[in-house]
Image (spheres, grey):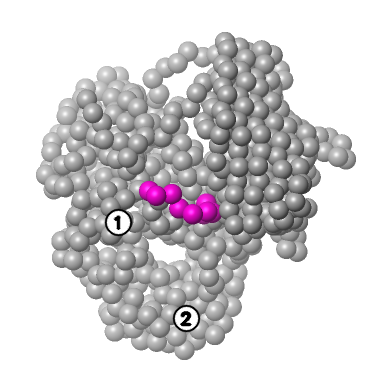
Amino acid sequence: MHVDPRVLTGRSAPEPQPRILHAGPVSAELDGADLRGIRVAGIELVQRVYVAVRDAPWNTIPATFTSWAINRGEDSFRVEFEARHAHESIDFEWHGRIEGTPDGTIRYELDGVCHGVFAYSKIGFNVHHALVGAIGRPYRARTEAGELRGTLPDEIDPQRIVGTTLSGMFDPYRELAIEVRDGLEAVVSLEGDLLELQDHRNWTDGNFKSYATPLALGFPFDSTDGLRIRQVLTISYRGALPEEAPATVPVIAVGEAIGPLPAVGFGQPSHGQPLTAREAALVAAVRPAHLRVDLVLSDPAALGALERAAKDARATGAGLELAVHANDASGPALDAIADGIRTVGVPVVRVLVYHLRAGFSALGGLTPVAVVALVREHLEAATGPVPFAGGTNQSFGDINRDRPTDPVFMGVCFSISPTVHAADDRSIVENLVGQSEVVRMARTFAAGRPVSVSPVTIATRFGPYPAGPPAPDDLPAAVDVRQLSLLGAAWTAGSLKHLAESGAASVTYYETSGWRGIVERESGSPDSRFPSARGATFPLYHVFADVAAWAGGTVRGTMSSRPLSVEALAVEDARGLHLLVANLEPADGEVDLLGITGDSVLVRTLDYDHAGDAMTSPAAFRARPGDAIAVLDGRVRLRLGPHAVARVDPAG
């Protein structure tokens, strides 16, 4: 049967599948020029290894690869290729060689040269250490001053700024050994430079990252014409290997009650047009708690944006989440907004206060206390007693280094995107766990104040972005074609699971309509490279519709034995236990659900076979009865297609 990959991922072709390499007992996946999933005895030693070249503003310069030679044996391998990163003044060329030997050692060599004079923030290796084998685990680092010993923290370590310089978690090192399992160390060492460690959870990445060259040396760096950069990264292990467990069907166990579902809303559409009656009806059906409207007080159009958002809010039954971008000079503009709030007559549910500035900053920070106080002073009488939250319109890392402890902050806010550092399908799935990590951490210093995640988007909104001319099939940087795919739905279900279980008070997802929304505009996509049908409901729409049906229920924790393959959100209400189960893999899979009561459940699946109906006839799809599946000793087995999402409800 022909499968249209656009339904699965939004793209016209599937991502290339990695090659499996073996170095004695160690296996690795070759994904382009990256190594992923480096394992021994089924235990992950390293999540990912790759080379990055980033310009002074931190944009990634993609490589062009040529002259591939790949030789694979049963217990060894050798890979060689040529790579070149060229954009504007940056021109870096290197030869790559990756070798795996029967003793379980992998050696990755970068040997390159700079052509011309340019400023850059990074040229070198990056190593991801997955959270499962890192959080709370002992480490040993060999530095220039001797060996450091410690334990990788459960709390998210802030990326500190000393003056204008970023610093790592501890001194730069030539070798890092992490005891990923009792008695087994994963060892990473580097020749030709030093490594530095950062807690990647600050950007919701699901790992710690070792990288060369240390940012503590100050950046950007300056090249000279002909400058040679050579680094050799070695990955190995120390200790006794446990017996590898046989492969089994993944299991999701339903645990204890946690708390209420967060209030879920959506952003106002960036296309700037009001919702049509049909679009508003579709959005109203998922019962949004709020619509987010950005009010940039330096923009004369801010009041018009408020009026348009109020109209959409009335049409969808939602309140307003005001995202106010202000500074010390915003008093007169705030007075105009206060008058507008009184005039439109739509309830404001919260106010998010951001420091008025433009674009992406690697050195961003917390909303100044004085700005939050100013916004409260001018708006509180108009909004009534609602939370005025401060934080950042970018990533959690901005506020983790400068935490909102002043009582003027009535809440804490930040945004989430899984594509700050990598945008491939596997990376965004790996980064789901980072969402629960940042909310859990934010709650430790919110001291009972609500944590608002706003917005959650797949693509980053302000960067950093890959530099260079766009490819012929590239969409605008803030648009992600996975928005209209089954993968987008599965990822959204995983995101809701992590944010709900970690205690977020409110979450704002995507936009209401358009290619960054949950439904396509009746007028259709402005670009044929975004292959949506006019007025379609994107598959992720149904994730929100399902969760809306369980409003007022209690979230119960779930634990997946294979969280990169399958995850679930569980909600219990007066009718019983409901689940959304997401297959995060691009292939068919099975999962056993444990802790299910009753004799049977009803299962309705959003998958490849039903995606067409879900997008073009949403009411008919949602009215389709579920299939009855027997519960045996509290266990239900589901079979799921690629990136399918199954809704599980009590029978009867």
The image shows residue 597, relative to residue 390, as above or below, that is above
Q: Amino acid at mark 2?
A: Ser
Q: Please state if 318 lies on the left or on the right of 402 as rendered.
A: left
The picture places residue 465, in percent across and down from the top left corner, at 51, 54
- Which residue sits at x=19%, y=55%? 535
Disc 2 and disc 1: Cα gap in Å?
A: 30 Å
Query: In terms of secondary structure, where does tag 2 sit?
Result: loop
Is residue 156 something one can see in this rendering?
A: no
Choose mark 2 or mark 1, whichever is in front: 1
The picture places residue 59, in percent across and down from the top left corner, at 57, 54
- Identify the magenta region: 465-473
User: Where does label 2 land, which residue?
Assistant: 298
The image shows residue 362, relative to residue 185, as above or below, that is below
User: Where does label 1 land, which residue?
Assistant: 527
- Which residue sits at x=69%, y=25%? 107
The image shows residue 555, relative to residue 401, as above or below, that is above
